[in-house]
Amino acid sequence: MRHLFRLTDWTPDDVHRLLDRAEALAAGGATADLSGTFAANLFFEPSTRTRFSFEVAEKRLGMHVLNVTPEASSVKKGETLYDTLKTLEAIGVSVAVVRHPEEGYYEGLGEGLGLSVINAGDGCGHHPTQTLIDLYTIRREFGTLKDVTVAIIGDLRHSRVARSNAEMLVKMGACVVLSGPPEWRDPDFPGEYVAIDEAVRCADVVNLLRIQLERHNGGEDELVADYHRAYGLTAARAHLMKPGAIIMHPAPVNRGVEIADVLVEAPNARIFAQMQAGPFVRMAVLEWAFKRERVAKSWACC
Ligand code: CP
């Protein structure tokens, strides 16, 4: 079984192969037969899209699904994440999908585990399956990732989606520009910081981010109150977008904050298309976790 903690080690070919497989599944291609296997979903932070699209993906692959509620598990009695996962492995679980507030919770976790751990988001760290969804959405739109200009805008420092996306977009040959409040910049991100209007004007993809209020220490009330005018995609600012440019957001969306309410479902918005891609991308990830030997027949197409 293979772990997916972050995409850093993936090559562009690895990514394209996964996206090809997700496209084949979205087009109605036969799935690998994972019937009789067990998946466990452990979400230590709230989630709607990731949790339920993983559950849909697991069920479409014929897996039995266990939804572990951390508050009702022996984690509350002090059991470590490693021992919880080891326990799930011992009772027959093959894949654990884990969201956790601690950045890098998976460091050192994988070695002793026979089950596959798929990172569904770690603190401000990484969100690899959201990034695969975003790459899928961009590739479907433009037929390529190469030389597509993606403006990642907003709360960069606290966003695991932004970190994963920026790293992988650069690796895939896209051009990344960054914008948002100076207070929320992160010097480790690849890409040039530009003013918000310039970011919106130059982008093929305007990739907005949610303000991660739950990861802030407070004291930013004024910045948040003025955010829509200063850094949001307002209706007026959207007029600066190039013809053919699209709007993306990993969601949940704060309507009227990162993006004007009227733009969320605009013809050039792909926010719900990103969500539609979720189960197919996650099915491909689950198949990948089982290694090629078990699913070789299904992956032969790509
Ligand atoms: N995009 C995303 O991770 O959404 P959820 O927090 O609802 O899973």
Image (cartoon, rainbow, N blue to C red):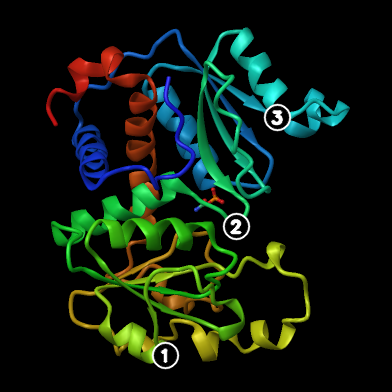
Name which residue lies at 47% across and 60% down.
Answer: 163
> Does residue 261 lie above or below 32 as drawn?
below
Residue bearing mark 2:
124
Q: Which residue is mark 3?
A: 81
Q: Earlier in the sequence, mark 1 or mark 3?
A: 3
Asked if disc 2 is less than 8 Å from ligand 1, the answer is no
User: Residue 103 at what x, y percent from top left?
Assistant: 63, 50
Instruction: Please name the residue shown 44% across and 55% down the image.
Output: 164
Q: Quadrant of the N terminus?
A: top left
- Under mark 2, the amino acid is Cys
Indicate the position of residue 277 as horizontal and vertical percent values: 33, 46
Label 2, residues with CA under 10 Å away: few <14, some 14-19, many ≥20: many
Three-letter amino acid code of the residue under disc 1: Ala
Q: Secondary structure at mark 2?
A: loop
For residue 22, what is the image quadrant?
Answer: top left
The verdict on label 3 being within 8 Å of ligand 1 is no
Determine the residue positioned at 43% across, 23% down: 59
Which numbered disc, 3 or 2, marks the residue that appears first in the sequence? 3
**Which mark is on residue 58?**
none
Residues at discs 1 and 2 in contact (Cβ within 8 Å): no
| Label 1 CA crowd tier, 10 Å (few <14, some 14–19, many 20+) | some
Residue 170 vertical placement versus 63 (above, below): below
The dot on residue 195 is 1
Specify the quadrant that holds the C terminus.
top left
- Give the percent coordinates (x, y) of residue 201: 29, 87
